[in-house]
Image: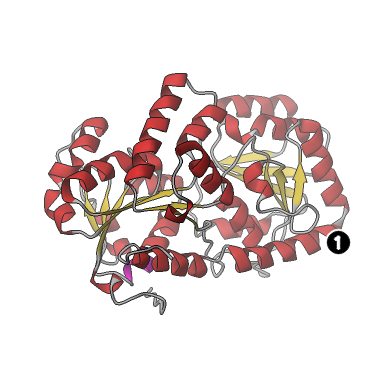
Amino acid sequence: MKYKNKTSSKRLYSKNIILFFSYGVSLSVWEKLGIIDRELDIAKRLKQNLKSLNFITYDVDKDVKYTDLLDGIKILSNKYRLPKLLYSFLIPLLHFKVLSKSDIYKVNQLSGSLPAIISKLIYRKKLIVRCGFQLSLFFSLQKEKQIKIWMAKILEIFAYNMADLIIVTTENDKSYIIKSYKIKKDKIVVIPNGINTEVFRKDHTIKKERGRIIFVGRLIKQKNLFSLIEALRDIDDVSLCIIGQGYLKPSLCKLIDKYNLRVEIKDFVNNYSLPKELNRSEIFILPSYFEGNPKVLLEAMACSLPVISADVTGNRSIIKHRENGILCGVSAGEIKSAIVDLLKNRKLMEITGKKAREHVIINFDLKKSIEKELIYLDSIFCSNLK
């Protein structure tokens, strides 16, 4: 599939970009998580406006099985099979030929920024740091050890000060960086997560399963899945589909068996197959204790699916209560009330589902996100950011 973008400057068509993967992440990890199609879709759209795009990954080999998917994107891998931490420090030297000839280094998540920062110091190239969430804040909310939080803060200090451009997905993240690290606001731009609304859409050929609720995400404490399971105990004629992997799966399965609930857990669904699962369902639910700019919520909304999400900062910036979705508390009782009330009000389900897709198309369409990023990519070669 080829992509065209009329907003790109001639400057970009002569530029080479290197994308640094998150720490420890490889194409095989993307595939295991079911997001390889989604992430490559974004990368290939960018590549159409550049001279070249290279991935620096933690793959131990240039896996040939991905060649046909890459559409000319080149992989720089850990062919020396070094330990991940050592490889991270040595990336600037191991891949010096390509790094020295590139124009822009881009980091998709802060955890992958260390080798990019070192490379910038050595080769004096432009650095873009994109953050889907604030690592130190995430660790704080997860109640991680203090040393881990401070290490994240140190990495953020270096990354944000070294960056020529910082891309965040929400205004809250922008404010957090300005307040916490005294970074000039003109250096930070907000580009929300983009959703391919041609892939994620309502499919009238797929029959809805009455009472089917769906959750997509990691099976970790943040997602508040035990409260969701508790909420379903006394609701008749509902089923839950959980799509995701995580360390809490055994404990969740025990609770599901204890209550004898109709819950199905699928470890893996390819991102391009996910719309089928969403369209089979009547409600999407995201009861997390905290979120950033959750793609899974936006993907469900793009499918015109009525959504229920916890009333927390990230979700609250997307959902307008009873207009394009339902906001609720994080307790089992509050989640139960939201589910029961929505299932009883079919008109509200129809209205919020329709408004949800309209909201995504206007504010989170992938084409618009790519166009905006290309404008800012080009702007870092000008004297001032626009």
The range drawn in magenta is: 44-48
Q: Quadrant of the N terminus?
A: bottom left
Q: Residue furthest bottom?
A: 6
Residue at the spot 21% in from the left edge and 44% down from the top edge:
121
**Image height check: is 44 above or below 293?**
below
Horizontal and vertical percent position of residue 274: 55, 56
Identify the image's colour scheme: rainbow, by chain, secondary structure or one colour: secondary structure
Q: Which residue is mark 1?
A: 347
- Within the image, what quadrant is residue 302 found in? bottom right
The residue depicted at 70 percent of the width and 41 percent of the height is 310
In the rendering, at what x and y percent does residue 359 appear? 67, 64
Determine the main secondary structure of the stretch shown in magenta. helix
Q: Nearer the viewer, residue 137 or 30?
A: 137
Tell me if 373 is positioned left or right of 78 in this view: right
Give the residue type at disc 1. Lys
Which residue is nearer to you in this view: 307 or 158? 158
Left or right of residue 165: residue 331: right
Asked if residue 45 is among those painted magenta in the image, a careful observer would answer yes
Identify the residue at image location x=52%, y=61%.
194
